Amino acid sequence: MSENVVIDIAREALFLVIKVAAPVLLVSLLVGLIVSILQTVTSIQEQTLTFVPKLISILLVLMLFGNWMLNSIKEFMIELFSNFSYYINVL
């Protein structure tokens, strides 16, 4: 397998990881920002207060986007396994 093929597979895998993780990370960031603004306004400085809203929002995002995430990963793996003979023959 040549270096270009390995680099292409790694690039596709990294892009897939970013694409799949983006909804969860963005929602977690937004909820954390909203809770921290509320903490600043109300002068409540409890560090564990952000945990429950983030946990609930992440679970909701996983329920909404989980099927899409798994299908994206499945399609990548099917493409990778179906081209396996090509990767072997490139050697």
Image: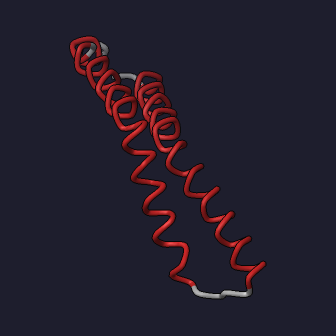
Q: Nearer the viewer, residue 67 or 16?
A: 67
Q: Nearer the viewer, residue 14 or 67?
A: 67
Q: Say above or below: 58 vs 84.
A: below
Q: Quadrant of residue 50?
A: bottom right
46 lies left or right of 10: right
What number of labels is visible?
A: 0
Q: Quadrant of residue 38?
A: bottom right
14 lies left or right of 47: left
Q: Nearer the viewer, residue 89 or 75?
A: 75
Horizontal and vertical percent position of residue 23: 53, 42
Report the residue that reaches farthest toward the front.
42
What residue appears at the point 41 percent right and 27 percent down from the top-left corner? 9
What residue appears at the point 42 percent right and 38 percent down from the top-left corner? 64
Q: How is the image coloured?
A: secondary structure
45 lies left or right of 16: right
Horizontal and vertical percent position of residue 54: 50, 63
What residue appears at the point 35 percent right and 24 percent down from the top-left corner? 76
Quarter occupied by the N terminus: top left
Q: Quadrant of residue 66?
A: top left
Quarter occupied by the C terminus: top left
Report the residue that reaches farthest toward the right.
41
Horizontal and vertical percent position of residue 79: 31, 17
Q: Nearer the viewer, residue 51 or 25?
A: 51
Horizontal and vertical percent position of residue 32: 61, 65
What residue appears at the point 46 percent right and 70 percent down from the top-left corner? 52
